[in-house]
């Protein structure tokens, strides 16, 4: 029987290990799932997870991720073979979310996407394990009989058509990260919390670990520095992953990031309320109201710092692009024009996080790649809710193959 791994939560716990088969930098949803899959596939490999914060990290994107599984979000490709693969990965991910991570919320919740008119080239999209099957347009007025909340949110005369994913479901990505990491530790993985990782440009993969502590004046400082060697280092640090590789190893990546905010719409969302989407804006039922998931337009330029825009001359916490989208949608979604929309007065009033964009493209699926020998980059991004776990499992299968001797 495998012995549980060790957990170092603070600097008072001495950390002496100098070598592991695999080091995973980042214990968010992607990194923690990878660690769990790797422990199941290759329990003989020594494994260390390194996380800069707690579990889950309250500063990362995992804790704010939408947690909306839907095949309507699968990337569209001209080649059906690629869509078949994504559909299989999506269904496998859904099965894992429903059963593989212990006790955590996983709630079926239809996603209804409303349209003013059919979109050219979007008549077919993968759904329900049949990637070549059409997702037909339905009458939004007919759907409103089943889901009366549609009339409270949207102008159905302006949005007469709808497509529905009845397999869609809601879950909490932070619960996936927590449960996956805990299961991985029970299966023998080690976990080092409150530790900043930096990659070293040295013969063989090495990572410098800065163990962090808080002074009596509430400053975060480095308590000690350790260097760990590994056969493989996996960078699963979300939007911070590509810069880690670029700064530490001098390799160039094409990936980008965008700052995503999640305002609230304080209208009731009782049990059975569907998720609703219009022009890329998703209204997700959550905590008795709605969390808004705005559309990501593009990567943010290097050095960009998010700032709030102005609505009718009043400063808000929402960035300008999101404000423009919401104002443009107020005729189609009258609920946005009332007093129930929370836009805040400054950036700190709204939850937000940096989201990684694979190759700088908001529509690109999750991916793993090997930018340098012994170093792997694992990225989730906007489609991590539906495809992320399958991509993490694919990397775990790759790493479970026989490893070369330590250099």
Image (cartoon, grey):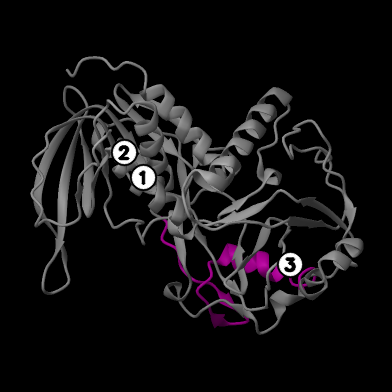
Q: Nearer the viewer, residue 363 or 146?
A: 146
Q: Which mark is residue 30?
A: none
Residue 401 percent location from the top left of the image: 36, 18
Q: In this view, does 387 lie to the left or right of 395?
A: right
Image quarter hosting the N terminus: top left
Q: Is residue 247 left or right of residue 276?
A: left
Decide if residue 18 is in sight here: yes
Q: What stretch is highlighted in magenta?
A: 304-333
Q: Earlier in the sequence, mark 2 or mark 3?
A: 2
Q: Residue 329 carries which label?
A: 3
Q: Which residue is drawn at 68% across and 73% down?
A: 270
Measure how far apart labels 3 and 1 are at the Cα level: 43 Å
SS state under label 2? loop
Q: Residue 187 carries which label?
A: 2
The residue under label 1 is 183
Examine the rendered structure and indicate whether residue 76 appears above or below residue 157: above
Q: Nearer the viewer, residue 199 or 251?
A: 199
């Amino acid at each position: 029987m495998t012995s549980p791994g060790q957990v170092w939560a603070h600097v008072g716990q001495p950390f002496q290990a100098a070598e592991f088969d695999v080091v995973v930098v980042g214990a968010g949803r992607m990194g923690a799932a990878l660690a769990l899959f790797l422990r199941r596939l290759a329990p003989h490999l020594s494994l260390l997870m390194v996380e800069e914060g707690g579990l889950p990290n309250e500063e990362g994107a995992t804790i704010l991720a939408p947690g909306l599984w839907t095949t309507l979000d699968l990337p569209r490709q001209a080649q059906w073979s690629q869509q078949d693969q994504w559909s299989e990965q999506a269904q496998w991910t859904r099965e894992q979310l429903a059963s593989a991570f212990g006790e955590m919320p996983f709630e079926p919740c239809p996603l209804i996407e409303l349209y003013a008119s059919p979109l050219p080239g979007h008549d077919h999209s993968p759904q329900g394990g049949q990637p070549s099957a059409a997702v037909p347009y339905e009458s939004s007025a007919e759907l409103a009989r089943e889901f009366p909340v549609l009339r409270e949110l949207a102008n159905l005369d302006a949005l007469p058509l709808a497509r529905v994913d009845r397999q869609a479901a809601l879950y909490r990505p932070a619960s996936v990260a927590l449960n996956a990491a805990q299961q991985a530790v029970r299966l023998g993985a080690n976990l080092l919390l409150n530790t900043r990782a930096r990659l070293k440009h040295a013969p063989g993969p090495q990572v410098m670990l800065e163990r962090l502590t808080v002074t009596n004046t509430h400053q975060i400082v480095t308590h000690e520095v350790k260097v760990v060697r590994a056969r493989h280092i996996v960078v699963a640090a979300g939007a911070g992953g590509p810069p880690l590789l670029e700064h530490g190893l001098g390799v160039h990546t094409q990936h980008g990031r965008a700052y995503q905010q999640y305002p609230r719409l304080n209208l009731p969302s009782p049990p059975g309320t569907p998720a609703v989407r219009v022009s890329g804006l998703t209204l997700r039922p959550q905590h008795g109201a709605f969390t808004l998931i705005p559309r990501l337009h593009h990567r943010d330029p290097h050095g960009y710092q998010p700032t709030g825009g102005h609505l009718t001359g009043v400063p808000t916490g929402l960035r300008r692009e999101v404000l423009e989208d919401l104002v443009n949608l107020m005729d189609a979604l009258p609920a946005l024009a009332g007093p129930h929309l929370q836009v805040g007065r400054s950036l700190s009033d709204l939850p937000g996080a940096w989201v990684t964009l694979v190759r700088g493209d908001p529509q690109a699926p999750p991916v793993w790649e090997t930018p340098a020998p012994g170093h792997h980059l694992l990225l989730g991004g906007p489609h991590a809710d539906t495809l992320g776990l399958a991509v993490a499992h694919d990397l775990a299968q790759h790493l479970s193959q026989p490893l070369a001797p330590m250099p």
